[in-house]
Image: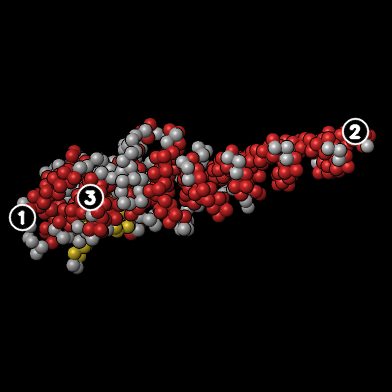
Amino acid sequence: MKNLLLPLLLIALLTCGKAMAAVEAKVEVDLDFERSDFANSTLPIWSQLGAFESLAVSRMPAARDGDADALLALYLLASGEPVTKRDYFDLRDELNTWIEELPLSDGQQPAADAHRLFVSMHSRYLGTDLVSNDMPVMYREDQSQLSKVFSSGEFNCISSAMLYVVAARKLNLPVDGVVLPSHAFVQLSLPGRTIEVETTSFTGFDVPHDEAFYSADYSDWFSARSLAPPTYEDYLDREIVSPYELGIFNMINQHTAEAVMPYRDRMRLAELRGYYRPWDESAQKSRLAYYYQEYVHLRERGDFNTALRMYQQLDGYLEELARRRFEDEEIPVLLTAVQAQMADTLVKTGDQEAGLVLARHLLQTRDFPETARTVESHLFSVVSRYAVDRAEEADYPSARLAFNALEFQCLKNRVCNSGLAQVYSAWAMHYVEDRDWERSADVYREYLLLDSSSKLSQHFSTNLERVYLNWAAHEEWNGQLETAMALLNQCTQLLTTASECESALVELDAKR
């Protein structure tokens, strides 16, 4: 399965500054960690959720409704760093104390309150004030984690926007995120007016985003922040997202790049993003790519029991995904690859019937373009493994039935053809050992009806000829010369090359 071309694990959705590089799935050095605490959530995800992550997940409905504390939990969750419940409650209380100390109008002057909040946020958390240069000292183009805003004071457009959104929601101000290809800011919607807030600039409150703002005169403002200067057309095509959606989007950003965040944390965010954006094809592709990689790692360790726990946790998700249609043609291929890994795991961990049923279903219902031949081979290896195991237990009818209705595909696949031949060979030899020449000949003939031209078929032809020779010799020994000659005649007619049967027939005819 290593030759399968995987889709990209990460696709940049929100960036401030240089676009995050897409990262291909591959074996990484930080894969070897303990997974005994995984699959501990009621969500259909594999990653372990700690106490804080579980709390944040439980508050998702409130985050959708714009609850400030739930949004804070979501944004910290999207940061991907280890956070404890105590950390979260301390930050919540800190923000509450900060806002309670502000001279606000109790909602009578929302625009003025929003501006006071903005100014105070810069001076308290972002290290800028009125006498500072407009380019903040603590601005970092790739610092997209809200958690690090609190711990280091460093920020970029998305992390500072999230801080302002949480604070604004504590005042019940109607705010949304605004997303451009290389930038993000905040929109405040008040009765009769809309205020756009550039959170990376101390003078960014209520800056009109008109054609002049996106003209050459403002190019230095963007380039100073390592932003690819957007155009006014980009602004017109902007995406306005809810505070909740802003947090889900931020689960894939600069801070989730492979060089920055450990695999374990990236996988958790990819799973959560996929769960909360089930319609997002890039999110599903990323999520599936992690499951593909998990199997590869666990297989290399021989830890199929852990892989089985993963598939038991994900079974419903994979079934639901299989019922959907996708515009991205790579997703069905990747999904089938993951399900093939699941079938392989089932066969290797004792639930062989379920593994066979799944593998056969996929082979009969999925298309396998040239790029997916390794996936098809993996599925045939599952079928073959099941059949060979049944043959080793002398359950030859069950072994043969595993290939039923798949013979045409099987014979074109080296792995499957080998398994099919192994089953028939063991089956025929079982009768040979019992000197049941008739049944052994039947088995060899049945295989040759399926395959009469491959190298494997040549071996079957040779063995069938030897069966006829032994069978004829047995009849001759019993004095049945006519029967023996009839068998040798049948041998010469069935097989293209049967020189030994022909010689034996001549000798027997001379004896007669």
- Give the Cα separation between the discs numbered 2 and 3: 88 Å
- Give the Cα separation between the discs numbered 3 and 1: 32 Å
Amino acid found under the numbered disc labelled 1: Pro
Measured from the top left, where is residue 339 in percent x and y? 48, 48
Query: Residue 68's quadrant in the figure?
Result: bottom left
Amino acid found under the numbered disc labelled 2: Glu
User: Who comes first in sequence, dot 3 or dot 1?
Assistant: 3
Q: Is residue 174 visible?
A: yes
Which residue has dot 3 on it? 55
Residue under the point 34% across and 38% down: 35
Count neighbours of disc 2 (C-alpha within 10 A) and say few if under 14, some if 14 to 19, many if 20 or more. few
Which residue has dot 2 on it? 507
Nearer to us in this view, 203 or 8: 8
Nearer to us in this view, 495 or 137: 495
Relative side of 337 to 436, left or right: left
Count neighbours of disc 1 (C-alpha within 10 A) and say few if under 14, some if 14 to 19, many if 20 or more. few
